[in-house]
């Protein structure tokens, strides 16, 4: 190797996407990207392809190349007024992208002026310059900024929790949302606010909860802030993929609330899963312990998904690649007994996957090529998935999610026959 | 491990495309930025790899081609611009990255694409390339750079710019002093919006004794690029600067199929008439008019035979067309299929927010109405009607088929309708006669089939101003246009608008 490592083909995005993802799901908000059209269009498109198309809320400030010389403050000023007037949001987040960041526009000053003319709209300004941080940083910083709108309350709701670290743009997000609510309700726990899949009013009232449940470790910064400012304790749980993680999720939550776990409910759930598994047991017996796999996903999800695959399906997990790290990534790595890459270069990830001779890849749409090259199935469980749609309430998370995952794995393997036949036809035609 | 080409796969599946066809993106709620166009061009040249000189976001986000979201640009290496590069410049990062890209991909061509960040730091990209090349660190690999400045704002900027860079930095130097091959042409496929009927044009040119050297960029290699500068004529689907450059510097003639300088739908190179004129235009440039007339006559006879069969049942049928006027496929209805345009509905909000004045809008509408009258229709013209007004007019005029961007809406009311997205691939660049037959078939199918009993999209809420969008997307579309133009929304009262303008003046003054 006669070069310094500078170039990268990243598996994760810059700060801007972290900002957008933290605000995706905040229903009465608008995000104004103060940057060039490329940044805006990339964000809008990713949001439209991965989350609810009803609530797409990424707006362009209109920054043009000629503004690079004279500044884009006047343009932003008009844009903020327009957004407030047309969309009537309760919160407008101004995300400063690279061009505006280098120009040094006084965005906070512009917002201050806008506030003279606009009522009933709150604003936040976030440095989202691509050069100033990673997707994970953008996500954490934005959540913390959202915390500043929360209001102290003395009427806490007993046994009500907030979920922190939920993203309304992950594959099967809608199903996961329902499943998380259902799981907690079955334990007699209600959900106060889901961050982020809520209205601005619900966000403001988040301190009413008795506990913050940080799923997978994303959003610990906000949880710390809420503990400090509003005396809301928090617990970090695994993202509930599979039965073990789901039980741990429930046990940790109940324990933190000082409640007993209702194991009867859990046993009933497990019985139902067992029934479904028995209906297709020959297929599941066939795949049990049969695959060598690699995964690429957010730290908050990839470790618990891997745990399900190894501890419940007896798959040989060869590689875990972390798309975006969080505050507990180090702890997670210490518990894992396989190769781990953290925010790797795409080429390094592909090298490693190729070398390990795996049979199935669990990643995002952007890894479609490596799965095709290696002729292995791709299970899309990680952001971004732009070539699958999830209209039903089938979750990946929770007890019910275990069945969705099993179903998808079996179907992907069955589909292989067709893929192989197609390859044969092409090579013999 | 080095990665073998093709690095990025230049395929858009027609059926998969349909899933994304309704994304109200390009020029409605966003413009994609220059990198998307550049990456689409480079994806179609085997052995070429981009090197994005910017932060990781410029790499990650650009994997998604948001003009047509199906294809993914899997490899978009970047120079990982950080705050360090913003302050001290990114030339060293570029040097290292060039060598690394070469070592890891072993490409035949590296295209350095600058971004906002590196444009603003003012890195001397050319000097870096010359230095690294000069040291022999990149073997035989060719390197070009594209900044967006070459395109001089000609759309699509990214595609135009990288093509210009290829012509200027690669083709011109490599073909210097070499003769042009007479009666030889290169064809360019349709770029981002789909491809025109290359095979038909190719066969017809062949019939005139003209050699079609290559179709760009359809499975071409880096080694094929110089041939763009070695033929008598390059044929492009729309105005392309690189072809003009080769004309100036190499004397290669340039024929541009679609020109957007004339809004009259009759000037589009589509349908039997439009194609015939374009084909004869090419023949004139090559001096083969005689041969071309015979080929065209023969081809016309063949296609007309097939078309006449499909056309039967279209002639005289009353139709309504709603949207933004005639473009691409809809142009054919009165002219080629002799259908009766009974109702013309114009939605003008988008045009207005894009800055078209009332006068310009009126002129545009008149051109389209005049076009229809030229072919024997006298339509009822509705401008931004309410849903009931549109339905009443359609019923009153006895319309049998509606061409619209919201077919489900008319299905709900029991009318037969075709969604225009089905015809999008037969756009400005669908030169040739085959598409004419295909479009006729789509219309026949719609007329021959019954209207759906209970359209699943029945409950979809639509915007009153832009009826083919939901209210949320209509907001995004309006905001996009207004913010780009620096306009203020009409939601602000006049007094407020005055204050705002004063504030803006003040901000600009500061």
Image: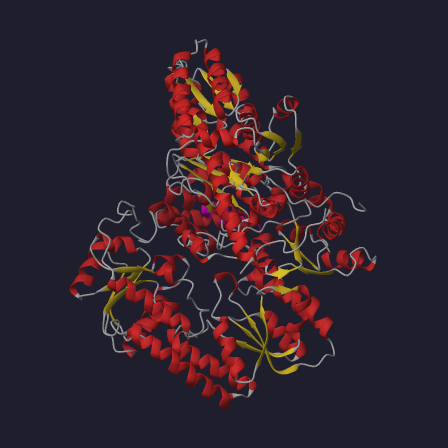
Pick the front one: B314 or A254: B314
Pick the front one: B174 or A277: A277
Q: Position of residue A79 (x, y in %)?
A: 46, 47
The residue depicted at 72 percent of the width and 56 percent of the height is B125
Q: Position of residue B161 (x, y in %)?
A: 61, 63
Q: Position of residue B369 (x, y in %)?
A: 29, 72
In the image: residue B425, left or right of residue B155: left
Is B204 drawn above or below residue B195 in the view shown?
below
Q: Position of residue B54 (x, y in %)?
A: 65, 48
The residue depicted at 80 percent of the width and 45 percent of the height is A1
Is A261 drawn above or below residue B163 in the view shown?
above
Pick the front one: A116 or B138: B138
Dominant secondary-structure state across the stretch colored magenta: helix
Is A117 drawn above or below residue A186 in the view shown?
below
Q: Quadrant of residue B83?
A: top right
The reply to whether residue B104 is in sight is: yes
In the image: residue B94, left or right of residue A117: right
Q: Is residue B336 shown in magenta?
A: no
The reply to whether residue A170 is in sight is: no
Q: Which residues are magenta?
A: A71-80
Q: Quadrant of residue B46?
A: bottom right
Q: Is residue A74 shown in magenta?
A: yes
């Amino acid at each position: 190797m006669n070069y310094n490592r500078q170039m990268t083909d990243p598996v994760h995005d810059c700060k801007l996407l972290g900002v957008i993802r933290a605000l995706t799901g905040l229903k009465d908000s608008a995000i104004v990207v103060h940057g060039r059209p490329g940044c805006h269009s990339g964000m809008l498109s990713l949001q439209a392809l991965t989350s609810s198309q009803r609530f797409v809320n990424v707006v362009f400030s209109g920054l043009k190349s000629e503004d690079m010389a004279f500044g884009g403050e006047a343009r932003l000023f008009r844009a903020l007024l327009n957004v407030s007037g047309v969309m009537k949001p309760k919160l407008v987040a101004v995300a400063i992208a690279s061009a505006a960041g280098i120009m040094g526009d006084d965005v906070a000053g512009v917002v201050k002026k806008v506030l003279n003319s606009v009522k009933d709209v709150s604003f936040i300004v976030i440095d989202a310059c691509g050069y100033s941080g990673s997707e994970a940083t953008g996500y954490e910083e934005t959540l913390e900024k959202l915390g500043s709108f929360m209001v102290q309350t003395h009427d806490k709701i007993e046994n009500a929790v907030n979920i922190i670290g939920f993203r309304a743009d992950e594959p099967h997000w809608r199903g996961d949302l329902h499943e998380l609510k259902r799981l907690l309700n079955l334990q007699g726990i209600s959900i106060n606010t889901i961050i982020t899949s809520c209205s601005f009013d619900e966000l403001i009232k988040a301190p009413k909860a008795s506990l913050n449940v940080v799923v997978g470790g994303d959003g610990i910064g906000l949880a710390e802030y809420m503990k400090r400012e509003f005396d809301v304790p928090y617990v970090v749980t695994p993202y509930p993929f599979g039965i073990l993680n789901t039980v741990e999720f429930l046990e940790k939550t109940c324990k933190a609330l000082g409640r007993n776990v209702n194991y009867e409910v859990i046993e009933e759930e497990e019985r139902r899963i067992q029934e479904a598994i028995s209906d297709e047991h020959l297929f599941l017996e066939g795949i049990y312990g049969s695959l060598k796999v690699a995964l690429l996903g957010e730290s908050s999800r990839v470790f618990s998904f891997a745990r399900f695959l190894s501890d419940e399906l007896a798959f040989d997990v060869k590689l875990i690649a972390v798309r975006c790290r969080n505050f507990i990534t180090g702890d997670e790595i210490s518990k894992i007994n396989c190769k781990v890459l953290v925010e790797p270069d795409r080429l390094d990830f592909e090298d490693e996957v190729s070398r390990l001779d795996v049979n199935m890849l669990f990643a995002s749409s952007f890894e479609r090529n490596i799965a095709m090259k290696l002729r292995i199935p791709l299970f899309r469980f990680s952001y971004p998935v732009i070539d699958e749609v999830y209209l039903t309430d089938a979750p990946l998370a929770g007890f019910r999610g275990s069945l969705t995952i099993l179903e998808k794995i079996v179907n992907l393997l069955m589909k292989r026959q067709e893929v192989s036949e197609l390859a044969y036809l092409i090579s013999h035609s | 491990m080095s990665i073998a080409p093709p690095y990025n796969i230049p395929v858009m599946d027609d059926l998969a495309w349909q899933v994304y066809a309704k994304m109200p993106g390009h020029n409605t709620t966003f413009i994609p930025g220059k990198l998307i166009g550049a990456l689409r061009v480079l994806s179609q040249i085997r052995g070429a790899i981009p090197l994005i000189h910017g932060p990781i976001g410029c790499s990650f986000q650009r994997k998604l081609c948001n003009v047509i979201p199906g294809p993914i640009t899997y490899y978009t290496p970047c120079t990982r611009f950080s705050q360090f590069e913003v302050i001290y410049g990114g030339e060293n990062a570029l040097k290292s990255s060039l060598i690394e890209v070469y070592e890891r991909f072993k490409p035949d061509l590296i295209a350095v694409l600058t971004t906002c960040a590196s444009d603003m730091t003012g890195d001397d990209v050319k000097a870096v390339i010359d230095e690294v090349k000069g040291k022999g660190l990149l073997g035989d690999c060719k390197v070009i750079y594209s900044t967006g400045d070459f395109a001089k704002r000609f759309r699509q900027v990214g595609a135009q710019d990288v093509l210009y860079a290829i012509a200027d930095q690669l083709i011109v130097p490599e073909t210097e002093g070499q003769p042009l091959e007479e009666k030889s042409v290169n064809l360019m496929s349709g770029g981002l919006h789909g491809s025109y009927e290359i095979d038909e044009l190719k066969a017809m040119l062949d019939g005139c004794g003209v050699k079609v050297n290559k179709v760009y960029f359809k499975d071409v290699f880096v080694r094929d690029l110089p041939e763009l500068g070695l033929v008598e004529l390059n044929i492009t689907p729309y105005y392309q600067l690189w072809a003009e450059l080769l004309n100036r510097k190499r004397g290669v003639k340039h024929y541009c199929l679609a020109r957007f300088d004339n809004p009259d739908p009759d000037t589009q190179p589509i349908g039997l008439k439009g194609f015939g004129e374009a084909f004869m235009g090419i023949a004139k440039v090559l001096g083969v008019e005689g041969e071309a007339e015979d080929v065209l006559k023969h081809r016309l006879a063949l296609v007309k035979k097939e078309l006449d069969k499909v056309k039967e049942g279209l002639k005289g049928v009353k139709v309504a067309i709603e949207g933004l006027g005639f473009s691409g496929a809809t142009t054919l209805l009165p002219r080629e299929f002799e259908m009766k345009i009974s109702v013309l509905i114009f939605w003008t909000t988008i045009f207005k927010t894009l800055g078209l004045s009332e006068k310009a809008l009126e002129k545009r509408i008149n051109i389209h109405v005049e076009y229809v009258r030229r072919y024997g229709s006298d339509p009822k013209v509705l401008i931004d009607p309410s849903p009931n007004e549109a339905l009443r007019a359609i019923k009153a005029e006895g319309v049998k088929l509606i061409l619209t961007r919201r077919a489900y809406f008319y299905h709900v009311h029991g009318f037969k309708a075709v969604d225009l997205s089905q015809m999008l691939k037969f756009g400005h660049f669908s030169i040739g006669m085959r598409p004419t037959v295909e479009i006729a078939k789509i219309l026949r199918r719609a007329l021959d089939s019954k209207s759906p009993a209970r359209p699943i999209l029945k409950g979809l809420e639509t915007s009153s101003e832009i009826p083919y969008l939901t209210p949320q997307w209509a907001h995004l579309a309006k905001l996009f246009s207004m913010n780009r133009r620096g306009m203020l929304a009409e939601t602000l009262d006049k007094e407020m608008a005055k204050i705002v303008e004063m504030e803006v003046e003040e901000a600009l003054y500061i």
